[in-house]
Amino acid sequence: MLKRLGGMSRSAIDKTRSLLGSSSASAQALREVRVVGADEHPVTRKLIGRNALKVLDRLNENGHRACLVGGGVRDALVGLKPKDFDVATDASPEQVRALFRNSRIIGRRFRLVHVVYGREIIEVATFRAAHDAGEGGEVASSGRIVRDNVYGTIEEDAIRRDFSVNGLYWDVADGSIVDYVGGLDDVEARVFRLIGDPLVRCEEDPVRVLRAVRLAAKLNFSIEASTLGAMQEVSSELGKTAPARLFDEVLKLFQGGYAEASFDAVRDHDLLQHLFPALQKRFDRLDESSAAQLESLLRAALVNTDRRVSEGKPITPAYLLAFMLWPEVEEAALAAIEQGEQVHDAIHAAAEEALSEQVRATSIPKRFSGPMKEIWQMQPRLERNHGTRALSLMEDRRFRAAYDFLCLRATIDPELEAVAEWWTEVQTISDHEQQQTTAANRPVATHVWGELPTGARKKRRGGTRRRRRPSKSGGEKHPSS
Ligand code: ATP
Ligand code: MG
């Protein structure tokens, strides 16, 4: 597929090596440059989005070098339709800004330009040099990059990217692909390899560990051995990553249409503890069958999310996040209800507690935590309410999400099946029939939340008629097992 045109630009390598100093680890990352002409690779203008092409063409027409880089090139090379386009250029952020009215300069850690077309954003980055190459870069004592705004040549830009397969440039001027880091070979071998010294590159930015896991899962690539070794060594550093940055990664893991594969990869690499610590602790203490049950609940939610993405339906992170934290919320709320707490108050307190623990790992913006709480609050109402009160629940703007949530819970909890079916049925019938159906009795999962008669919301003492389901609370691993 790809014809090798070796030796074209040894001088470029030599020039960059001398710029970086021959002993520099970054210099060793440079391979012999390889340029593959437009007719010798599968990345065509057709595969690249209209808006990305507009940006690339305008930069090029104004005398700047403009390339598509990163996921767009990588995905197109392996036959996936790229969804997101990143542009790299020798124009400064100010020059880019001046060319596009619909643009803004963003970021501190990386200064970038966003060119905005409705809901699509084309990210334009100026070629950057390695962080140790001059003013504008900043490295903390841990080896982490704090600021990374040293502009440089395209060769320097290539070696500061994370993985070789992410360091390929599609040049709009002639449609060629330029490879300074051995990325084309790695695309062919379907392998993720950190550019340069893998340990140094992981320590600089531990989030690369998550990126490798996510992207390898998405593309079904393997991870090269020394890259994997470095990832294992550095992964505990993920716990020190800014919660907001980890939240961005969570969104990419679970919203990109391959949430199930990402979740499996995150668990296989033992990274769940950094993203959802309470969930990992729960998996650790559950016995095998309870862990399998919890896993099927989460899997059902992940598969559902992937299906919606593939059907082009809207998704909200609130839904999946609500599942990740639900076992904590449910368990704590049930315990409080056992103690006589009102259902609403019990869920409220349990939700606050679960969220405050979670935001130490990944932030959760209020626009998502609000709907999550509403989905949780509606669960006992969906399980308990019947009669005409059920009709008003259907008017609630969170009904749809809460109902979907209940249905997925019902797929692994046979005791909820009848309730979920009732709600499904009542939505499909006429208004008149709805009145009749809701007036009649229907199955109510009283075993879960209890059906507290009005006025009976005092503290209960001693035994209760409500049964706690063994799967959630009784299935904990025995210390000796
Ligand atoms: P996708 O968009 O499919 O998630 P991507 O590789 O395009 O994958 P982006 O986050 O869009 O991911 O980043 C674009 C490019 O920027 C990457 O391909 C890589 O070259 C570079 N990059 C992103 N994050 C890092 C990082 N943490 N360290 C070094 N380079 C990075
Ligand atoms: Mg991208």
Image (cartoon, rainbow, N blue to C red):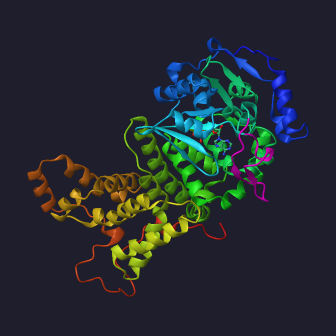
Q: Quadrant of the N terminus?
A: top right
In this view, the residue farthest toward the left is 432
Relative image position of residue 256 (x, y in whole percent): 50, 41
Look at the image and say whether residue 64 sits in the magenta stretch: no
Figure check: 5 above or below 291 = above
The image shows residue 449 at horizontal and vertical percentages of: 34, 70
Instruction: Name the spot of residue 440 as percent of width and height, x first.
Output: 14, 61
Say left or right for 320 vs 421: right
Residue 436 vertical position relative to residue 6 in the rendered view, above or below:
below
Task: Measuring from the top left, give residue 293's x and y in whole percent.
Answer: 49, 55
Locate residue 97 relative to residue 233 in the image: left or right: left
Outermost residue, top direction?
39
Rendered view: 114 above or below 87: below
In which quadrant of the rendered view does residue 246 lie? bottom right
On the question of residue 56 being in view, the answer is yes
Q: Nearer the viewer, residue 53 or 278?
A: 53
Residue 149, magenta (yes or no): yes
**Which residue sits at x=19%, y=46%?**
428
At 59% from the left edge and 43% from the top edge, which residue is drawn?
Answer: 112
Q: Nearer the viewer, residue 178 or 391?
A: 178
Q: Is residue 232 visible?
A: no
Assign the C terminus to one quadrant of the image: bottom right
Q: Quadrant of ligand 1?
A: top right
Please provide the residue range marked out in magenta: 129-152
Figure check: 302 above or below 185: below
